[in-house]
Image: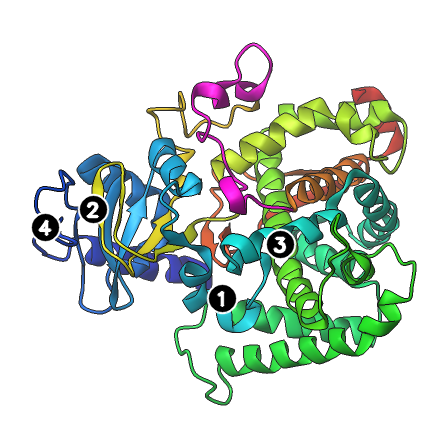
């Protein structure tokens, strides 16, 4: 019974925060004769600002959208932050035609100490140089290799799942993805060493969300600092052997990767990219599997449809080419990403005075890109709160209403380099999961969301999990 109390407390705090009396003010006065408009907004309670509204991000973004439009500011943990909402405003930020926005500075405060110099925390020429090399790790042949490594691990982990009237799907998926990351990304066998890598990684991810941002003993931050140091030592100690190997895991590939001109990564580069890749790939894939599981549990007609499609493949583990034949599963994944994008917000910071859609932004302004909530705006999406995978089917293609209406992987120069890997991993897991199990959630169950790297199931996502018997599968096929 602890969680409902927690939800009430969070709801009360969020309500009081949003209704805190505050006068509208401009973020800054535009330069005279510039023709630019000020960004309007309110701070909220002192220091805290609207930070508690993270527990109702969609509702908060919608209300601010209705009041201020696509560009507005609000308070968050002692600073003014500009919210960017809707495909037109997102396009302006993603394309950054004035070259005035920094990913490194935007993300630096939040995740920089633990994921510094990952691909997302690099800008301009340096980012292009690293991305060109790293792209060698995500070619189609490499993706095939990763899937070959992944499928046996998926089967092994799913075999350990047991039917349960209250099976925590999100937590089980998280455990599975950590195991897969150890094998596919790091190239380690499951055992005490891989578990230590996982613990260090979890500590680093948790510390990035800490309120106390100092290495006080016993705090999230202190555990994150220790976790980052462990990961640095672990990867650095193995670089030479990985460079000399022909391994197909991501760690080995990054050690050997070269751009067309022969340029490769330094030891420091490999360490930084491996630590960031673990976070970026693991968390988003876990959340996506859980969100798909939630909607398939709520909509058994869709679960039956995608299961029949997987059964028609007549293979326990889908090959790379098989995944293209899971058309309905692809529709479900796209709609799940629209309904609850695994990356709740993206970040940028202005490096000099600039503008977005005619609104003046001074230098050193933090931007929060509301990409996930933007995919739930009725101006672009009919019935935005209805789970309807067919909206992505041929003949409708509602995402084409605007180039940036559906962008769960970001866009522009920093569009997720691992988006095809993530889609492949999620479909491979779901294919095997559908063949082994069916699951439901109560009709009146609404998944409560907490905040990690993005919105995730706060209660672990309890489902009624049952085995799919051969007889039952045949009767439904």
Q: Quadrant of residue 190?
A: bottom right
Residue 305 in view here: no
Q: Is residue 454 left or right of residue 189?
A: left
Circle 2 or circle 4, nearest the eye: 2
Q: Residues within 10 Å of mark 2 (few under 14, many from 20)?
A: many
Residue 459: mark: none
Residue annotated with mark 3: 129
Q: Magenta stretch: give its range.
A: 390-417
Q: Is residue 408 left or right of residue 288?
A: left
First reached walking from the N terminus: tag 2 or tag 4: 4
For marks 3 and 4, give the CA distance.
43 Å
Residue annotated with mark 4: 24
Q: Is residue 256 left or right of residue 349?
A: right
Circle 2 or circle 3, nearest the eye: 3
Which type of secondary structure does the marked residue at label 3 adopt?
A: helix
| Closest to the observer, 158 or 359 | 359
| Closest to the observer, 300 or 402 | 402
Which type of secondary structure does the marked residue at label 2 adopt?
A: strand
For marks 2 and 4, give the CA distance.
16 Å
For marks 2 and 3, give the CA distance.
31 Å
Residue annotated with mark 1: 111
Please, is residue 342 above or below residue 220 in the view?
A: above
Indicate the position of residue 383 as horizontal and vertical percent values: 40, 23
Q: Is residue 395 magenta?
A: yes
- Residue located 78% across and 31% down the image: 323
């Amino acid at each position: 019974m602890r969680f409902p109390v927690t939800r009430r407390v969070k709801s009360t705090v969020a309500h009081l925060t949003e209704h805190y009396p505050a006068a509208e003010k401009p973020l800054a006065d535009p330069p005279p004769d510039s023709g630019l408009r000020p960004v309007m907004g309110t701070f909220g309670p002192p220091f805290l600002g609207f930070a508690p509204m993270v527990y109702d991000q969609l509702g908060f973004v919608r209300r601010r959208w209705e009041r201020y439009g696509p560009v507005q500011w609000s308070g968050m943990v002692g600073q003014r932050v500009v919210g960017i909402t809707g495909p037109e405003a997102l396009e302006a930020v993603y394309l950054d035609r004035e070259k005035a926005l920094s990913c490194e500075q935007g993300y630096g405060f939040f995740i920089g100490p633990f994921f510094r110099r990952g691909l997302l925390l690099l800008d301009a020429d340096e980012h292009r140089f690293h991305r060109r090399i790293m792209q060698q790790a995500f070619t189609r042949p490499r993706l095939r290799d990763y899937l070959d490594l992944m499928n046996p691990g998926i089967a092994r982990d799913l075999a350990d799942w047991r039917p349960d009237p209250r099976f925590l799907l999100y937590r089980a998926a998280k455990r599975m993805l950590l195991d897969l990351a150890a094998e596919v990304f790091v190239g380690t066998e499951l055992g005490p060493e891989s578990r230590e890598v996982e613990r260090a990684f979890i500590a680093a991810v948790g510390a990035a969300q800490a309120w106390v941002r100092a290495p006080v003993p016993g705090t999230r931050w202190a555990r994150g600092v220790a976790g980052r140091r462990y990961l640095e030592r672990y990867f650095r100690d193995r670089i030479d052997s990985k460079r000399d190997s022909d391994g197909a895991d991501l760690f080995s590939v990054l050690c050997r990767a070269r751009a067309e001109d022969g340029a490769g990564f330094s030891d420091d580069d490999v360490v930084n990219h491996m630590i960031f890749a673990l976070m970026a790939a693991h968390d988003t894939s876990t959340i996506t599997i859980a969100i798909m599981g939630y909607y398939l549990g709520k909509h058994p007609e869709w679960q039956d449809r995608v299961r029949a499609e997987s059964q028609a493949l007549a293979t326990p583990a889908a090959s790379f080419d098989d995944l293209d034949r899971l058309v309905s599963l692809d529709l479900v994944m796209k709609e799940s990403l629209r309904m609850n994008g695994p990356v709740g917000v993206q970040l940028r910071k202005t490096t000099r005075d600039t503008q977005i859609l005619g609104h003046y932004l001074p230098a050193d302004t933090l931007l929060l890109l509301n990409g996930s909530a933007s995919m739930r705006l009725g101006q672009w999406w009919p019935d935005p709160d209805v789970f309807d995978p067919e909206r992505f089917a041929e003949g409708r293609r509602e995402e084409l209403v605007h180039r940036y209406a559906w962008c769960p992987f970001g866009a522009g120069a920093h569009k997720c380099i691992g988006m095809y890997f993530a889609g492949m991993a999620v479909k491979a897991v779901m294919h095997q999961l559908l063949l082994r199990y069916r699951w439901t959630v109560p009709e009146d169950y609404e998944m409560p969301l907490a905040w990690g790297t993005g919105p995730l199931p706060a209660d672990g996502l309890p489902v009624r999990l049952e085995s799919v018997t051969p007889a039952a599968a045949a009767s439904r096929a």
